[in-house]
Amino acid sequence: MRLRLFGGLRNITREGAIRNAFAGISLASMNIPQVLGYTRIASMPAVTGLYTVLLPLVAFAIFGSSCRLVVAADSATAAIFSSALSRMATPGSPHYMALVSMVALLTAGLLLIARIFKLGFLADFLPQTVLVGFLAGVGVQVGILMCGDMTGLALTANNSLIQAWELIRTLSQSNIPTVLLSLLVIFVILLGKRFASRIPIPLMAVLGAIAASAMFHFSRYGIADIGQVAGGLPVFGLPQVSWGETLPLVPVAASCFVMIIAQSEATARAFATRHREAIEADADILGLAAANAAAALSGTFVVNGSPTQTAMAERAGAENQFAQLVFAGAVLVVLLFLTGPLRYLPRCVLGAIVFTVAVSMIDIAALRDIRHESPGEFTLAIMAAITVVGAGVEQGILLAIALSLFRHVRHSYRPDTRVLIPGTSGNWVPAPVVSGTQTGPGFIIYRFGADLFYANYTRFITDIHMLTDSAKPLIRSCVVEASAITDIDFSAAHAIRDLLIDLAAQNVAVIFARVSPSLHADMNRHGITAVIGADRIFTTLHEAIAAAQHRQKALANDKM
């Protein structure tokens, strides 16, 4: 496994370093309130949010390749482990924190395995369309959870739907000052995002809320604050979790792993493409493994390639990982000298900040585009979102993968099949496969739109029989346009070989066109070439049609 360190710092210049240093300070001002807010989703102490943007940032900068990806706390992964671990330990307790760190360590191990065996392709099993629905569901789930903090109500249920019902049922008991402050913060953040996106409005909201809370004693009005925030460096060490407690954490870590692979790679690719930059997926996976190992050993939670924070970094002017290193330096200063005033920060302000992030995860425009362009994929996206809200994040991500695979298998199981007939301008026009359809008198060109395997070869055989049995005039040549067929498995090959023998007995010649080298090798290995003859396998459609027409003429001359 070849290592290339500091890949995200390539081609850095002195002027670029200065520019990225300012971007890093700006990024810190925007992101520190956000990572503090994510601790509410993770049910972790506020200081652990700062830990996610300390050593993990440095670890990814060393081992990763993406110049722009920001690896830090993320709402999706926080929701994954918090929903599972809250049933195993009291949220925020030392035992809970140990379990959370162990999930990060297990996730790092899975990512390292993925790097060693080059399993980055697993990200392809969570397509962008389903990811949009999944993130929308996470957004709804997080939004409901944050409504408790924003109203001053303690939501005790784990399920989002039950939480929503609990919220509605106890809404009359809300703390009015807490609600008003939450609405004010949301209004200010949304207004700033609309008209002043480069200004760190969340940081200004946090600083303003801290100052106002300390000056006017918000706690007197029932507005809860986050309490004392421990300062200084994190305590390093392995999480103290027994082997019996570790095993149930593996599925949680696996869910985080899949989410990290899918979301981080999608984000890194999107921003690299936008800026015409090269990335190495394997190096990024190694960087993510190192970042999560750093998170586990420093007592914090799973980190992920965050699309929202990466977008913030781009808006701040960050061009490479030097900006993230400066960001980590700014967090170190906060940890050492500035955690004292954080105790006055109203909890509802963090809830409001995270609520705005949750709302931004529901990409209505993307869902509308998916519905317009691919109604089937839109249905899968909505089902993933509903599952996340109704059953949980882990179930949602597993369903998303299962539905995506099912949709792919369904396409392969029922591929598009056509008969090619002459068009008005001399081209070939695809027509439905129905009895009686012929390309020309006595011959057909049949197109099968997928690889042949055990689940779909009956479709191939049924279509051929439909087109050749009782045809008028009788079919004597059948050209199989095989451009979409790259592989034939054992079961399909044996069934098709029997079909070819039956057709030969009926004086029907089968000719294969547009045969790729891999398909030709399969046909040789399975004995199909021996049945039909090597002279009936062609790399072009033109040659195959010429062979079929030549046979038709020869049969016509024999009758004369």
Image: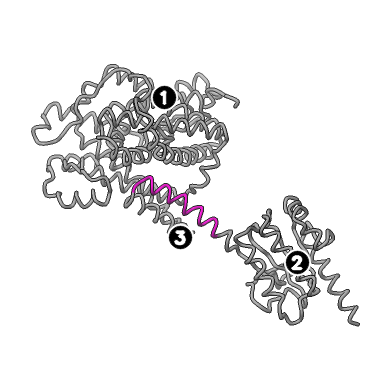
Report the mark closest to the observer, 2 or 3: 2
Q: Name the front one of labels 1 and 2.
A: 2
Quarter the N terminus occupies: top right
Closer-to-camera residue (22/528)? 528
The segment highlighted magenta reads 392-410
Give yes or no for residue 397 being in the magenta stretch: yes
Q: Does the magenta stretch include residue 236?
A: no
Report whether 533 appears left or right of 125: right
Q: Distance between the residues labelled 2 and 3?
A: 43 Å
Identify which residue is drawn at 54% across, 55% down: 408
Residue matched to label 3? 372
Q: In which quarter of the image is the C terminus?
A: bottom right
Residue 453 placement, left or right of 32? right
Q: What residue type is labelled 2?
A: Leu
Give the CA separation, mark 1 to mark 2.
61 Å
Residue 202 seen by the camera:
no
Q: Is mark 3 on a helix, strand or loop?
A: helix
- Looking at this view, is 378 or 467 the one in front? 467
Using the image as rendered, state which of residue 156 and residue 241 is in the foreground.
241
Look at mark 2 in the image and give the residue it sits on: 500
Instruction: Look at the numbered disc 1 and give the secondary structure of its residue.
Output: helix
Instruction: Name the amino acid, label 3.
Output: His
Which sits earlier in the primary sequence, circle 1 or circle 3?
A: 1
Q: Which amino acid does label 1 sit on?
A: Ala
Query: Circle 2 sits in a helix, a strand or a loop, which is it?
Result: helix
- The residue closer to the viewer here, 90 or 37, is 90
Image point (40%, 35%), residue name: 247
Q: Residue 294 carries which label?
A: 1
Query: Which one is closest to the eye, mark 1 or mark 3?
Result: 1
